[in-house]
Amino acid sequence: EVQLVESGGGLVQPGGSLRLSCAASGFTFSIYSMNWVRQGPGQGLEWVSSISGSSTFIHYADSVKGRFTISRDNAKNALFLQMNSLRDEDTAVYYCARDRVKDTTSPDPLDYWGQGTLVTVSS
Amino acid sequence: DIQMTQSPSTLSASVGDRVTITCRASQSISRWLAWYQQKPGKAPKLLIYKASTLDDGVPSRFSGSGSGTEFTLTISSLQPDDFATYYCQQHSIDSTFGGGTKVEIK
């Protein structure tokens, strides 16, 4: 059974940093691109970033480019999101999600999602 | 960036109704469009990809159509479990979600 479990959320001050993790199990992690998608309180979904299985291809939304860094550790079946220079508008539930298709190099539909981890940016 | 515009933002309907949601892209995305269903407090669920292909286990009352810049999600006969918020997603260039359509009980 595919499982994605996010962790690392919490309360952080504007300008601060936070690192999110996603533990994956139940599938061959290294051959799937992975994504972060966020959802602000009462808001819609916003795609944040994606990373290919080999970490060769990485994409970011303009809203986080230069501030967030996506990475992965295939040996540990783990996905990460390093978030720096956090702003109030980064407050959201952050979901880890898997591409539907193996071995993609660009974002794809997302067939498995974690339960999300809440990041609150506030002074 | 490709912008995705969904309409309506809210839709009131009754069980058994035929429901249609529209998603428009700011430029052509061919058929690189997916639809998701999300219920309160839960992660989204993939319904349709490549504009019209149902994901595994999705009931046949859901259907998708369109190409280029205009797409629709249709629920042929609304069921109690279908009251939720629906999102479209383009993945032609990076990825963008539409603003969502909440389907509520009339």
Image: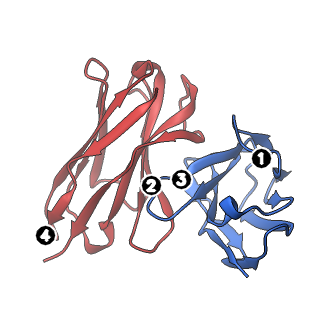
Residue A29, visible in the rendered structure: yes
Q: Amino acid at mark 4?
A: Gln
Residue under label 1, please give it.
B51
Task: Please give the residue where the numbered disc 4 appears in the rendered image.
Answer: A13
What type is the residue that disc 2 sits on? Ala
Q: CA distance from mark 1 to mark 2?
A: 22 Å
- Give me the chain letter of mark 1: B
Q: Earlier in the sequence, mark 4 or mark 2?
A: 4
Amino acid type for the residue under numbered disc 1 = Ala
Query: Could you tell me if the residues under marks 1 and 2 are in contact, i.e. CB atoms within 8 Å?
Result: no
Identify the residue at image location x=78%, y=75%: B14
For disc 3, the marked residue is B44
Q: Are marks 1 and 2 on the same chain?
A: no
Q: As rendered, which of A69 and B35 lies closer to the eye?
A: B35
Image coords of residue B83 (percent x, y): 66, 66
* Subunit under mark 4: A
Q: Does residue B84 appear to the left or right of A11 in the view shown? A: right
Mark closer to the observer (3, 1)? 3
